[in-house]
Image (cartoon, rainbow, N blue to C red):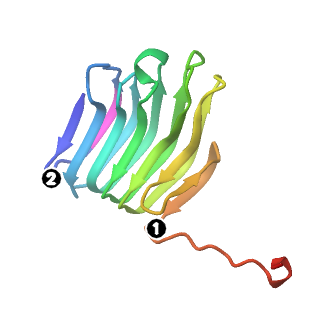
Amino acid sequence: SLWVTDGGGGTFFDIWTPSTFAQSGMLVSNTSTEGRVYQMSSEHHVRYEVQMRNVSNWRVYALQTEEERGEGGFALPLEMDGCSNITVANFHIYRVISTFQPFPYAVKVSNSKDIRFRNIHSYSNSKVAFDSTIYDQTHDTVVRQREFAWLTLSGDAPVVSPKPASAVL
């Protein structure tokens, strides 16, 4: 529905994009120009609600996505690939009650660094929501918590603490 590309940026405010015919509700690609999105509702798309590819210096505040039973059963609410210096704050990810199949994750991040998530809510009154809220494809790591205050993906591999000596058999 909305495509910002090739150096585009700016401020986008109060957008509702429920087009089932669009590949994505919003696609931002190939830009390092600052961008800000305030209060966007991207709903009912078949493949993606919001995509960011090769993007830096963007802030997304109060994004809400909604997957509907018919067209959104396999839609990914947010995908980021090759991104850096991105903030997503007050993000509400929702699947309607009549959804009948789960989806593995609500957010997919790959080849990205300095991605900041603040105040994230992934929920559904359906029995089948998202298995995980965030999937870091680069490091094959998931965040299962449905609500959290903050998370920063630095781009570095996660550090796994060694087991204490008393736990070794």
Residue under numbered circle 2: 7
Percent across and percent down for residue 10 are 23, 46
Left or right: residue 62 compared with residue 33: right
Residue identified by numbered label 1: 154
Other residues around mark 2 within 10 Å, as few (<14) / some (14–19) / many (≥20): few
Amino acid carrying label 2: it is Gly
Mark 1 belongs to which amino acid? Ser
Instruction: Compare residues 155 and 161 and report the one nearer the observer.
Output: 161
Does 40 appear above or below 31? Answer: above
Q: Residue 98: where, in percent of width, then height?
A: 57, 15
Residue at left offset 79%, top offset 80%: 164
Q: Are marks 2 and 1 in contact (CB under 8 Å)?
A: no
Q: Earlier in the sequence, mark 2 or mark 1?
A: 2
Eye-nearest disc, 2 or 1: 1
- Left or right: 151, with 77 as reference point: right
Q: Residue furthest right?
A: 166
Q: Which residues are magenta?
A: 11-15
State the image quarter where residue 20 is shown.
Answer: top left
Q: Position of residue 89 (x, y in %)?
A: 49, 47
- The structure residue drawn at horizontal position 64% and vertical position 44%, both measured from the top left corner, is 147
Query: Which SS class for mark 1?
Result: loop
Report the residue at 30% width, 58% height from top: 82
Query: Going 46% across and 71% down the picture, which residue do you hit?
Result: 156
